[in-house]
Image (spheres, rainbow, N blue to C red):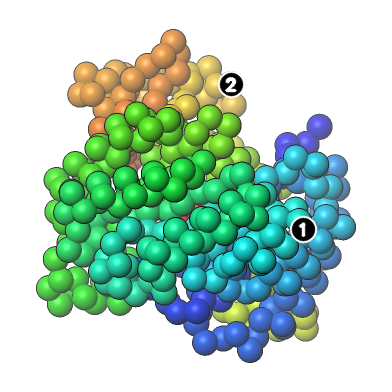
Amino acid sequence: MAEKLGLYIHIPFCRSKCDYCDFYSLSGREYRMDDYQKALVAHMKETAPQTRGSQVDTVYFGGGTPSFYGEKRLRELLKTVGRLFDLTKDAEITVECNPDSVDKKMLTRLRRAGINRLSLGVQSACDRELNSLRRPHTFRQAQEAVAAARAARFKNISLDLIYGLPGQNLSGWQDTVEQTLALEPEHLSCYGLKVEPGTPLDDRVIRGERLPDDDCQADMYLWTVERLARAGYRQYEISNFARSGFQSRHNLKYWMGRPYIGFGSGAHSDFGGRRFSFVRDLDGYISGILEGGTVIDQCELIPQRDRGGEYLMLRLRTTRGIEEWEYRREYFMNFDLIEQKLEEYERQGWAERHDRRWNLTPKGFLVSNQLICDLLSLQEEGCGEKTPPRLKQGREDLGDRAP
């Protein structure tokens, strides 16, 4: 039986663009929503026959701001998915929302349509910090959005938070976490602020705006891991924490190397041994789908050996980690050099071993980019390759704002 498949649907429309955001999203283009909807439906109809034999067990509406797109369009898309794909009865179906664009009536209609998981972009409990990011909501609106979701009988709510914000210190971040815990979500995503080139925030930093330094951000992160563990949220990925049974099944597809198909401008896919993406151009995507033009931006066949590199890179983001014979069996590569390096990491407190399975510790997660790069270099050396594996991972399809 084929592996179960995830679907990602990218909604690039936003009420306003946040200063830190480099996802493919647009403000002021609402007049193209109806045409974009037609393109998404047509794209699904075109793609669905290729998935015969595969069941879909996760659907993720990401953005942008899907809740700004409107519940009527979201319900139509989900109905189209149910008609065209073999959707399992227990599928996890997530919609990303901003607190300013939801209410009980809307959320009730979404739940009745089959959506069973919400991802709310809270980011901070401090309105001054929200304003510094140009977020379109207050923390009070976030509290009201969670209350509305509970009133609409949602039982799986994820909240996004960002640490390392302009003007933020450890006590301020701790207050955000405590106030967010009081909302009792099932899942929390806690990301360190990343200043992306070309964003308004990048320009502000270039002009001298100060952010918390690396040591301060490390303190924020390590405190968060410990505090959330005490509150009953188990860390299962670098930035993600969940109560038992509420890990994001869709996001785990990315980190575990499972197949998924994306729809929409800027969306990425990994299906049939190929990784491909669609143009980050709203008008180009609409015209390409509806008028028969080109919408593929990049497409490449991923050799099995490159998949071995992805196994190291993506699995080591998770607390499940990697396992020697899993690696040898799937990728036919020697694990000895990698294990020697992991033993070195263990002595530094960056990794730990349980039987034959290795994972990074919270301290290791802090420096995971360098640790994983070193392991990939060893893999390259062991394979006698001259070029490293291609490990580019699209960001529009990572859901819950994975970094």
Contact? badges 2 and 1 (CB < 8 Å): no
Front position in the image: 284 or 239: 239
Horizontal arrangement in the rendering, residue 7 relative to residue 220 (left or right): right
Q: Which quadrant: the N terminus?
A: top right
Whole-percent x, y for residue 250 in the image: 61, 45
Q: Secondary structure at mark 1?
A: helix
Horizontal arrangement in the rendering, residue 282 relative to residue 196 (left or right): right
Q: Residue 330 is drawn in which quadrant?
A: top right
Residue at point 77% right, 77% down? 38
Say which label, 2 or 1, has the lower sequence index.
1
Whole-percent x, y for residue 401 in the image: 46, 55
Front position in the image: 45 or 250: 250
Residue type highlighted by circle 1? Ala
Q: Residue furthest top?
A: 355
Disc tally is 2
Question: Which residue was labeled with disc 1?
Answer: 113
Whole-percent x, y for residue 224 in the image: 30, 39
Q: Rounded to the nearest whole Å, what is the CA distance between mark 2 and mark 1?
A: 42 Å
Neighbor class of circle 1 (other Cα within 10 Å; few <14, some 14-19, many 20+) is some
Residue at point 45% right, 79% down? 16
State whether residue 398 is above or below residue 303.
below
Residue at point 72% right, 62% down? 109
State whether residue 344 is above or below residue 355.
below
Horizontal arrangement in the rendering, residue 286 relative to residue 330 (left or right): right
Whole-percent x, y for residue 384 in the image: 41, 33
Question: Which residue was labeled with disc 2?
Answer: 329
Residue type highlighted by circle 2? Arg
Q: Secondary structure at mark 2?
A: helix
Horizontal arrangement in the rendering, residue 386 relative to residue 172 (left or right): right
Neighbor class of circle 2 (other Cα within 10 Å; few <14, some 14-19, many 20+) is few
Viewer-side label of 2, 1:
1
